[in-house]
Amino acid sequence: MIAPQPTAPARPENDTIPLPAPGRTGESPTLVACPDCDLLNRLDGPAAATLLCARCGAVLRRHRPNSLDRTLALVMAALLLFTLANSFPFLAMKSGGFVQETTLLSGVQELWRQGLRLLAALVFCTCVLVPAAQLTGLLTILLPLRLGRRPPPGAARILRLVQAAAPWGMMEVFMLGILVALVKLGHMATIVPGVSVFSFAALIVVMAAAFSTLDPVLVWARLDPRP
């Protein structure tokens, strides 16, 4: 393993490199601010290394092999699961020969009809709108990059919106609420989970994997129009 400068300590046991603080050189290095201490660091280490802040040791960039291919595959799988989760019944309740099925969108509509409009809007935004926007945005950016084409205009703004919307995706909270409802309603009626429940659970895992394999530094470098 090669450190970015002879004076920078190296850690061959875990392939991490503490980056030196930026100095005056003849090149234009890529600078990144440390998320913990705000120190500007140069990303001039090997591509297959984990780069650390020179001051506090925070991870600035973690090597993710085949980031574009893996993330694009996971995003396409997540879009398929998202379609299934919103197309098939979420739950079916059987009681006294009566069967009532509900989907995710019909549940939102029922909350709206009952006057819980704020809750209905919150569920729709966090479980439908935000995941759909994130997946569509990532597909719009990553597919042209994978095919070697120029991304559409506004791709940088789309990527910023995808990253900004990440905290608003609360599908895990909604899934926990469904599990609590299954436990509480189990003694009143027979609750049959639908295809949408399993698709929704798989969607949570696949989306988490997609964002963990995404390399934002690589994507921003591909989106940079400068030579």
Image (spheres, grey):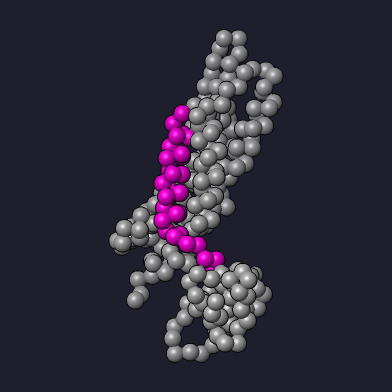
Question: Of all residues shown, which one is farthest toward the left?
Answer: 149
Q: As displayed, is residue 192 above or below residue 22?
A: above
Q: Quadrant of residue 3?
A: bottom right
Is 25 placed left or right of 117 in the picture?
Answer: left
Q: Quadrant of residue 174?
A: top right
Is 170 placed left or right of 84 in the picture?
Answer: right
Count of numbered marks: 0
Near-viewer residue (175 or 11): 11
As for residue 69 lying within the magenta part, the answer is: yes
Q: Residue at x 64, y 27 (%)?
A: 182
Say if residue 108 shows up in the picture. no
Question: Of all residues shown, which one is farthest toward the top?
Answer: 97
Q: Percent position (x, y) of residue 214?
A: 48, 58
Q: Percent position (x, y) of residue 168?
A: 56, 49
Q: Secondary structure of the magenta portion, mostly?
A: helix
Q: As displayed, is residue 47 above or below residue 93?
A: below
Q: Quadrant of residue 98?
A: top right
The stretch in magenta equals 60-88
Position of the N terminus, as image quadrant, is bottom right
Q: Percent position (x, y) of residue 162?
A: 48, 55
Near-viewer residue (103 or 61): 61
Say if residue 148 shows up in the picture. yes
Position of the C terminus, as image quadrant, is bottom left
Q: Residue at x 43, y 37 (%)?
A: 83
Q: Residue at x 58, y 71 (%)?
A: 15
